[in-house]
Every structure is written in C-alpha cells, then in structure tokens.
Amino acid sequence: MNVIGLAGWSGAGKTTLLTRLIPLFNAQGLRVSVIKHAHHRFDVDVPGKDSWRHREAGAAEVLVASGTRWALMRELRGESEPTLADLLTRLSPVDLVLIEGYKAGPHRRIEVHRSGNAKPLLFPDDPGIVGIASDVPVESALPWAHLDDIPAIAALLLAKAMPMSEVLRMADPKGPH
C-alpha cells in the first residue's frame, strides 16, 4: 500500500479535492482508502439507534453489518488517541491511502492552498510537503498543480506517495516494520 496526504488550512478545499480525486483513481483501477483526522468530537452513529445505545451502555466496540457495508466503532473511553501508524495498520489492503489532516505525521503531503483563505503557505516550514495544489501559481522548487487540474494532482499524488512500510518505519524507527 502507498500513502500520501493532503494538508492545508481549513477551507482550502481538501475534502472537495478528495471527492474529485477518488473517482479518477477508481477509473484507473486503483482501490483507495481515506483516513481523515477530526479535531473535534464526531459521531457516525445515530442517537437512539441500537448501535448507539450499545456504545452508550459502555461497549468498547460495536460492529454493525449489513449486506452492503459494515462499520466498526471503537470508544476510546479515556485511552490516548490512536496514532496515524496505528490507524494505517488497521486498514484492509488497497493500492493507495489518502490522508486528510495529520499535518505532523511521518508521511509525505501535498499542500492544498486557496488564495481566498488569506492564510500563509505551510510548505516553507513543513519538510513533509512535497508538492502544492493551489488556485494560483506558487513560486517554489516544489511541483505545483492547479486545484482544478484533477489529473495533474492525481499524477502528483501517485508520484510522491510512499510505501506504508516506510511510513510505519519513520513513525517508529525501533519497530519491526
């Protein structure tokens, strides 16, 4: 599995970009998974439904399954937030893992920048950024693609993606990865 991330300020368009990239990768025959970091509490369950009631009652994990999908929810209940490496090892094998967020992770990242946000670029201070997708050209030695050029951004992501084993090794240099 190869891993590459998208990093950028809130409102830059990371999620929108991912929703445009994933169908292109699928059309190329690639299986893609996404890990998204949330900086706030979130819930994927519906209050009052059985699985929600099971979690509220104290279950550590609740797995919900049907003929079309399954989902495993795990309550941390005071445990530390899992690291990106922990989460990567829980994914089923795919061709490409796209990571939204985790700006400080050991993986390479493409910066998503929108000039209208009036926020500074991240790349000068982040050595993990290996390319830029922006709505305006950016002066840099890093490769750049326009935010609307989805094939160019897809090619950049594939060219800069790194093997998951390398990400895991960088996350824990002492580990057996």
Image (cartoon, rainbow, N blue to C red):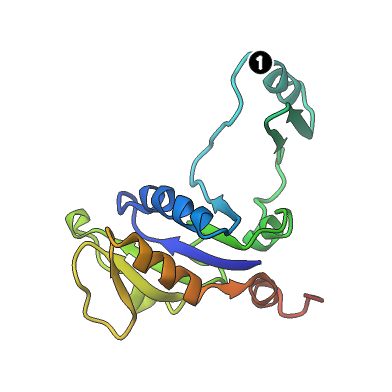
Outermost top residue:
48
Residue shown at 48% from the left, 52% from the top:
22
Quick one: 28 or 143, which is closer to the camera? 28
Quadrant of the rendering where the N terminus is positioned: bottom right
Nearer-the-camera pick, 23 or 78: 23
Q: Would you identify the image quadrant in which residue 69 lies? A: top right
Q: Which residue is mark 1?
A: 49
Residue 157, x across and y down, in percent: 46, 69
Taking 169 as reference, is 47 left or right? left
Give, as a three-letter code, the residue at label 1: Lys
Residue 122 shows in this picture: no
Q: Residue furthest right?
A: 176
100 relative to 146, above or below: above
User: Where 137 falls versus 76 (above or below)?
Assistant: below
Residue 135 percent across, percent down from the top left: 22, 62
Q: Percent x, y for residue 88?
A: 67, 59
Q: Residue at x 73, y 59 (%)?
A: 89
- Looking at the rendered structure, the number of numbered marks drawn on it comes to 1
Which residue shows up at 36% across the image and 48% down it? 16
Q: Is residue 25 visible?
A: yes
Residue 82: percent from left, percent from top: 67, 53
